[in-house]
Image: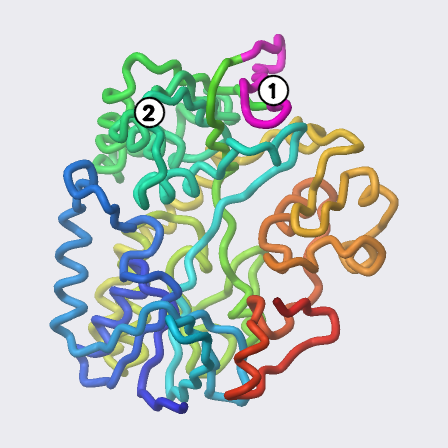
C-alpha cells in the first residue's frame, strides 16, 4: 500500500499537531502518523477515568483545530524504515495481524518527541520501579495506585507534575527527590518571574497540591530495597543516606530526544539534538523538525516550532517569520532549563558491578567496564541490541561512559515476521526481529 501526500508529519504530540494544522490550513494535503491510539503525545495523553483526567484547554483547542484543518490522522502507525528517498514505511497492528504501509511525501516534518532518561542503580530493575512519566501514563490507562506509597525521584520539572497527577489518582506521594541542588534551581525559578510567569505559576500550583509531601533538592536515589518487589528506596543528599519506605518508585532523570528517525534520514545533529535553521528545516532538503528532538524546551516551544515548521513546509514564509521572536524566548527558557537540571557527577557512580545496565540483554555494569566504546560493547556484550534498540541503555551508557551511538539502522523498531508476507522490510545484520 502506497499513500502520497504533500506533507507527512511523524508524531501527533503538540509539535506535530501544530505542524499538521498549519500545513493543512495553507492548502497542503497532510497526513499525520502516530504510534499511539489517539493524538496528544505523552504530554496530552488522555485517561480512561474522565472524572480524574482533567482535559487541558490548550489540548482541546489544538485537537479541534487539527480536525478542522483537513489533515488526516492515522493512529497506531510506527515508522520503521526509509525504503527509498521521499518514502517512509510504517507498520500497523490490527486485530487480524500486522501489515506494512508506505507513504510518499514532498515535505516531511519530524515531531518525534522525547523519552525519559534512565540511569542504572542497584535494584532499579525490580518490579515496582517505573519511569516517572511511564507510571503516569500507566495510571491514566487504568493501573491502580490508590493508597500506594510512591517516591518520585530523578530530575526535571516533570517530577512535580507526575507527583501531582499520581496524588489525584489516590496515591500517597511520600517524597519527591530532585537531584539538582538549590543553588541551580533558584536562578532558574527567579528567571521565570519575568519571562515565563505562567510556567512558574503552574509549578507553584503543583507544589501547593503536594504541600504535605517533602520536596528534597540535592537528593537522589542510590538503591532500591526489596527482594521480589519494591519495599523502599535509599536516598542520599551527599551527606547522609536514609531509607524511605514505599510501594512504588517513579524515577526519571529528565528527557532525551527521539532522534533515531532523523538520523536514519541523514539529518545532522548538534550535540544530542537535530540541527535546524530558522525555518525548522534540517540539513536534509524538505525535511523539517520541531519540538523536543531539536531541544528540550516544553509545551509552548513545541507548539511554536511545530507551527513554524508547518508554515515553512507550506511555503508560508512570511507567516512563519512572525513567530521567530516567540520561539527565541522559548529557546532561552530551554537553555535555562538545561542549566538548572544538569546532572550531578555522583549519578555516574551509582551502578555497582552486578547492576544491570542493558535490560533487554541482561548486560551488567562490570561487563561494560571492560570495553572502550559503544561499538565495542555492542559487539562483545550485545548491549543495545535488544527489542528497545538501545533506547533505554543508550542514554545510560552515554552518561556513564560518554559513549555515543555510532549508527542507526532499519527497522527502527522490531518488526513481526508476518509483515514479510505483504511487503519486504530492510533488515540490518545486527537487528533482532521478533
Label ID, residue 225: 1
Q: Residue at x 35, y 29 (%)?
A: 145
Quarter of the figure that contains the C terminus: bottom right
Q: Residues within 10 Å of mark 2 (few under 14, many from 20)?
A: some
| Vertical arrangement, residue 191 with respect to residue 335, above or below | above
Residue 252's disc is none
Lateral position of residue 142 relative to residue 429, left or right: left
Which span is picked out in magenta? 222-243
Answer left or right for 194 relative to 360: left
Instruction: Write down the quadrant of residue 414 in the picture.
Output: bottom right
Q: Is residue 73 magenta?
A: no
In the rendered structure, are the residues bearing label 1 and label 2 in contact, judged by CB atoms less than 8 Å apart?
no
The x and y percentages for residue 361 are 71, 51
Question: Which percent across, then down, holds residue 344?
Answer: 60, 29
Question: Within the magenta stretch, is there residue 236?
Answer: yes
Viewer-closest of 34 and 230: 230
In the displayed structure, 285 sits above or below 171; it is below
Q: Which residue occupies the extreme front position in the image? A: 96
In 3D space, how far apart are the residues under numbered discs 1 and 2 (Cα atoms)?
A: 20 Å
Dot 2 corresponds to which residue? Answer: 171
Q: Is residue 346 visible?
A: yes
The number of callouts visible is 2
Q: Residue at x 56, y 11 (%)?
A: 243
Of residues 300 and 143, the one nearer the viewer is: 143
Query: What residue sits 80% from the left and 45% below the top?
Result: 368
State which quarter of the image contains the N terminus.
bottom left
Residue 305 horizontal/vertical position (percent): 32, 62
Of the pair 43 and 2, the residue shown nearer to us = 2
Location of residue 226 in the rendering, given as x and y in whole percent from the top left corner: 61, 21
Please state which of residues 113 and 419 is positioned toward the viewer in this rendering.
419
SS for callout 2 = loop
Amino acid at each position: 500500500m502506497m499513500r502520497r501526500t504533500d506533507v507527512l508529519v511523524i508524531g501527533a504530540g503538540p509539535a506535530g499537531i501544530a505542524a499538521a494544522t498549519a500545513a493543512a490550513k495553507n492548502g497542503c494535503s497532510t497526513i499525520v502518523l502516530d504510534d499511539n491510539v489517539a493524538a496528544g503525545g505523552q504530554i496530552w495523553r488522555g485517561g480512561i477515568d474522565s472524572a480524574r483526567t482533567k482535559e487541558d484547554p490548550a489540548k482541546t483547542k489544538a485537537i479541534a483545530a487539527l480536525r478542522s484543518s483537513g489533515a488526516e490522522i492515522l493512529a497506531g502507525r510506527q515508522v520503521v524504515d526509509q525504503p527509498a528517498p521521499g518514502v517512509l514505511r510504517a507498520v500497523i497492528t490490527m486485530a487480524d495481524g500486522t501489515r506494512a504501509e508506505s507513504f510518499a511525501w514532498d515535505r516531511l516534518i519530524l515531531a518525534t518527541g522525547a523519552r525519559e532518561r534512565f540511569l542504572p542503580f542497584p535494584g532499579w530493575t525490580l518490579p515496582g520501579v517505573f519511569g516517572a512519566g511511564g507510571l503516569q501514563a500507566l495510571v491514566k490507562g487504568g493501573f491502580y495506585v490508590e493508597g500506594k506509597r510512591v517516591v518520585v525521584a530523578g530530575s526535571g520539572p516533570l517530577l512535580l507534575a507526575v507527583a501531582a497527577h499520581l496524588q489525584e489518582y489516590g496515591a500517597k506521594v511520600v517524597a519527591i527527590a530532585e537531584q539538582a541542588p538549590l543553588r541551580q534551581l533558584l536562578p532558574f525559578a527567579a528567571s521565570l518571574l519575568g519571562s515565563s510567569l505562567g510556567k512558574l505559576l503552574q509549578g507553584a500550583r503543583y507544589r501547593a497540591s503536594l504541600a504535605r509531601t517533602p520536596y528534597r533538592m540535592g537528593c537522589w536515589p542510590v538503591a532500591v530495597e526489596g527482594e521480589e518487589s519494591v519495599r523502599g528506596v535509599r536516598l542520599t543528599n551527599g551527606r547522609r543516606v536514609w531509607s524511605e519506605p514505599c510501594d512504588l518508585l517513579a524515577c526519571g532523570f529528565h528527557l532525551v530526544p527521539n532522534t533515531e528517525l532523523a538520523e536514519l534520514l541523514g539529518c545532522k545533529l548538534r550535540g544530542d539534538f537535530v540541527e535546524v535553521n530558522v525555518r525548522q528545516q534540517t540539513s536534509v532538503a524538505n525535511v523539517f523538525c520541531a519540538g523536543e528532538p531539536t531541544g528540550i524546551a516544553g509545551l509552548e516551544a513545541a507548539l511554536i516550532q511545530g507551527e513554524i515548521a508547518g508554515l515553512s513546509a507550506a511555503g508560508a514564509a512570511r507567516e512563519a517569520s512572525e513567530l521567530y521572536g516567540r520561539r527565541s524566548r522559548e529557546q532561552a527558557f530551554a537553555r535555562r532549563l538545561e542549566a538548572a537540571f544538569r546532572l550531578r557527577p555522583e549519578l555516574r557512580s551509582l551502578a555497582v558491578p552486578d547492576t544491570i545496565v542493558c535490560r533487554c540483554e541482561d548486560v551488567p555494569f562490570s561487563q561494560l567496564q571492560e570495553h572502550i566504546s559503544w561499538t565495542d560493547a555492542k559487539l562483545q556484550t550485545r548491549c543495545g541490541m535488544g527489542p528497545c534498540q538501545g533506547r533505554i541503555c543508550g542514554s545510560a551508557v552515554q552518561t556513564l561512559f560518554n559513549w555515543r551511538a555510532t549508527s542507526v539502522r532499519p527497522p527502527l523498531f522490531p518488526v513481526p515476521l508476518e509483515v514479510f508476507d505483504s511487503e519486504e522490510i530492510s533488515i540490518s545484520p545486527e537487528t533482532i526481529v521478533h
